[in-house]
Image (tube, rainbow, N blue to C red):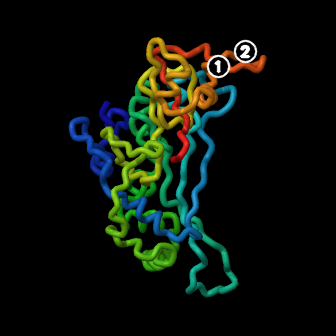
Amino acid sequence: MHISTILGPLGFILSNVIAFPTEATQPLLHKRAYTYGFLSHVAGMYRFGTSVAPACNGADCPVLTPEETLCQESRYKLENFIKFPPDPLRANKSDTATTNVEICSYYPPVDLRCMKHGVSRESALGLPKYLLEDQMNKYGIAGCPATPEQVLKRVMVQQSKWGEEKARRMLDIVAPGWEDETKDPEELPVRRGKEVLVDDRENPFHLPGWVSVRVLPNGPIQKAILDCEEWMVARRGDTCTNIAKRMGVTREQFMERNPVVVDKEAKNMGKLECRYLWAGYSYCVPDRPML
């Protein structure tokens, strides 16, 4: 579905400001990300982030399938703030209040296949419709800042009394060289855990390069494991021992990471038995020990 059919009148604006790639021209994520470079060289004492609770929690939330759970559950809004110090040129030197300015807010992106499970395209890429529209209304562009000018715009909108001269001066304090777009020439793609995601993943909202993408497994799952970074499909005739061997872990590590395969009655009697391993289903690969 084209983005304009999802967002209605806003689609035309987005197609020009955000420039969503078409299906035929989806780029690989091998571009330098200004947001990452900017936030990386903001002095640590001025940079911090917070998480906001998900939109749905508790008994009123819908019952989800395991795949829907992977796509939708516990997606917290992430916010990157700059904590500006008191203005060195302030008239009242006793005023030591700091100023927090939001530079970037988004939801962790998920696999685009989540669109089959009720997640919109823009939400899968990091911005649900409500957040996208809010940012468009405030800043004229959605997503994290892709240029120094967009950083400046965010600061000036949130601190309307500062003016451009003060906004630039305060940015010079917390992030010297913030206007240098070549500050960090490293290629910074969105990542899937520790792996670079290179499967034509789009990043139209310029999310920072440290963001992980929650990826769906290739086969069905018995139970969602939200923090799983890698999955493997069980073959016909597999046991917990040989699938664990293919994963490069022990049988016990595999069963601990995938408790759904464990016989609970046997476990209550002190035995660890693999009973519910199903061929064709995906199971989470435990973290392997560092060599």
In the foreground, 237 or 49:
237
Disc 1 is placed on an element classified as: loop
- Residue ID at (60%, 21%): 63
Q: Secondary structure at mark 2?
A: helix
Q: Are marks 1 and 2 in contact (CB under 8 Å)?
A: yes
Q: Which residue is mark 1?
A: 262
Determine which residue is flagged by label 2. Answer: 266
Q: Is residue 68 left or right of residue 61?
A: left
Q: Counting other residues with Cα less than 10 Å from the Cα at mark 2, is it few (<14), some (14-19), or many (20 or more)?
A: few
> Percent x, y for residue 179?
37, 72
Residue visible at 39% across and 63% down in the picture: 150
Q: Dot 1 surroundings within 10 Å: few (below 14), some, or many (20 or more)?
A: some
Q: Is residue 286 left or right of residue 209?
A: right
Give percent across and percent down for residue 180. Answer: 35, 72
- What amino acid is at disc 1? Val
Q: Given the current orientation, which residue lies at the most extreme left position?
A: 24
Image point (57%, 30%), residue name: 250
Q: Is residue 121 above or below residue 12?
A: above
Q: What amino acid is labelled 2 in the image?
A: Ala
The spot of residue 283 in percent (x, y) is 51, 25
The structure residue drawn at horizontal position 58% and vertical position 68%, both measured from the top left corner, is 83
Q: Is residue 188 visible?
A: yes
Circle number at residue 54? none
Residue 145 occupies which quadrant of the picture?
A: bottom left
- Locate the N terminus and report the quarter of the image it occupies: top left
Position of 269 with respect to 243 (left or right) is right
